[in-house]
């Protein structure tokens, strides 16, 4: 029996367009963790992220017959997710609650975590859960457009050009948004460190 | 010592470790199938195109340049109208108008506007008068009976 997981995205999209829902399941397995991370880091709420993740994929499934392949499926579904999340956050306004989970236990083995919590760094005394909370608070002080750029670049590691395609803006705009967002985050986290 | 940009980026990268519980994506797939089926049912209904249109409208983002463009057009039109360079209505020359007035060259009410050519001569009244006549059909109906200008002969 053919293993759909070995197929390229283009082929999976074609099969979904032909009515093969199992091909779409493979696309779900491939991209749902990234889309979840994107939406979660833009909303800071797991319930909202869960609902938006499902809405994004349901919408993609409904619209996939119109997908012409001018961009990759990866870019296309990221664009759907970013647009839906921006609309959601703007409608929600300031009425939201952050829902925080513990970090994955693998964090203790992460090189950057070890560096940051080393004895000669300024944040060595910060408790891990408090650090997580401050990070999320700082992120939520950014505009949702800036948050999207920070999430895709810093957390997901997407290149500038790819982010520009997802957002439909010039690469220079992505760079300037990142610069501004980093400055803002530096200021917010500095305030926290002084407390 | 202030956090530098690199440290901020390192902190941000730690957010990769904020993950949903194990097995979450497998379990959520069932919910996705339910929504996909619900979407298919909705699509087969009569107004599915309207729902899709509204959904797309909802996710449509107006480019910021569009607001500036609309405001610029408004300013240009307002300036043109304000200075009298352009007007949406043609100008009406009261005294030199050549508009035809049916059966009354001296004026009257035509198309809801008072023709003022009678003012120029000073010979006629501006407003037409309705005179009784036996030759024409009575104009008004009162209580279902035609009005006659003759004295009724019976009671």
Image: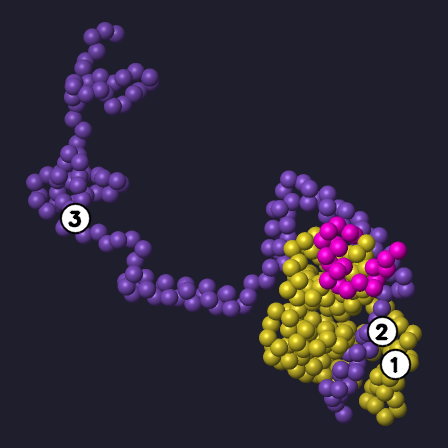
Chain colours: A yellow, B purple
The chain ID associated with circle 1 is: A
Coordinates of residue A150 in the picture (x, y in percent): 71, 76
Instruction: Please give the name of the residue rendered at 55% of the width and 66% of the height, measured from the top-left corner.
Output: B63
Instruction: Confirm or deny contact between disc 2 and disc 3 (CB under 8 A).
Output: no
Instruction: Confirm or deny contact between disc 2 and disc 1 (CB under 8 A).
Output: yes
Span shown in magenta: A1-21
Which residue is tagged 3? B97
Coordinates of residue A78 in the picture (x, y in percent): 71, 66
Q: Is residue A103 left or right of residue A183?
A: right
> Quadrant location of the C terminus of chain B?
top left
Which residue is tagged 1? A110
Q: CA distance from mark 2 to mark 1?
A: 9 Å
Q: Is residue A46 left or right of residue A145?
A: right
Q: Is residue A29 left or right of residue B130?
A: right
Residue B57 in sight: yes
The chain ID associated with circle 3 is: B
Residue A60: assigned label: none
Which residue is tagged 2? B17
Circle 2 packing at 10 Å, graded few (<14), some (14-19), many (20+), is some
Q: Is residue B145 left or right of residue A97?
A: left
Residue A146 in sight: no
Q: Earlier in the sequence, mark 2 or mark 3?
A: 2
């Amino acid at each position: 029996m053919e293993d759909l997981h070995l197929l390229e995205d283009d082929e999976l999209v074609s099969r979904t367009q032909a009515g093969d829902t199992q091909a779409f399941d493979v696309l779900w397995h491939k991209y749902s963790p990234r889309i979840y991370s994107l939406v979660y880091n833009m909303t800071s709420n797991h319930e909202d992220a869960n609902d938006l993740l499902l809405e994004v994929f349901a919408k993609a499934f409904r619209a996939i017959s119109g997908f012409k392949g001018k961009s990759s499926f990866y870019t296309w579904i990221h664009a759907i997710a970013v647009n839906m999340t921006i609309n959601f956050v703007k409608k929600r306004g300031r009425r939201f609650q952050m829902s925080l989970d513990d970090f994955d236990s693998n964090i203790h083995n992460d090189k950057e975590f070890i560096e940051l919590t080393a004895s000669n760094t300024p944040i060595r005394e910060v408790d891990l859960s408090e650090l997580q909370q401050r990070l999320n608070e700082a992120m939520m002080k950014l505009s949702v457009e800036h948050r999207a750029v920070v999430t895709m670049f810093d957390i997901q590691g997407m290149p500038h050009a790819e982010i520009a395609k997802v957002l439909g803006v010039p690469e220079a705009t992505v760079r300037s948004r990142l610069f501004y967002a980093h400055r803002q985050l530096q200021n917010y986290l500095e305030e926290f460190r002084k407390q | 010592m202030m956090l530098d940009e690199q440290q901020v980026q390192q902190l941000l990268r730690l957010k990769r470790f904020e993950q949903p519980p194990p097995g979450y994506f497998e379990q959520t797939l069932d919910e996705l199938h339910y929504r996909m089926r619900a979407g298919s049912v909705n699509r087969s209904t009569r107004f599915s195109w309207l729902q899709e249109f509204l959904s797309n409208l909802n996710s449509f983002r107006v480019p910021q340049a569009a607001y500036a463009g609309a405001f610029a057009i408004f300013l240009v039109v307002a300036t043109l109208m304000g200075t009298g360079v352009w007007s949406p209505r043609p100008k009406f020359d009261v005294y030199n108008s050549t508009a035809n007035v049916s059966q009354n060259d001296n004026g009257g009410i035509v198309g809801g506007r008072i023709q003022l050519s009678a003012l120029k001569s000073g010979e006629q009244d501006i407003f037409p008068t309705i005179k009784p006549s036996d030759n024409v059909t009575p104009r008004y109906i009162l209580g279902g009976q035609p009005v006659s200008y003759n004295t009724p002969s019976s009671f």
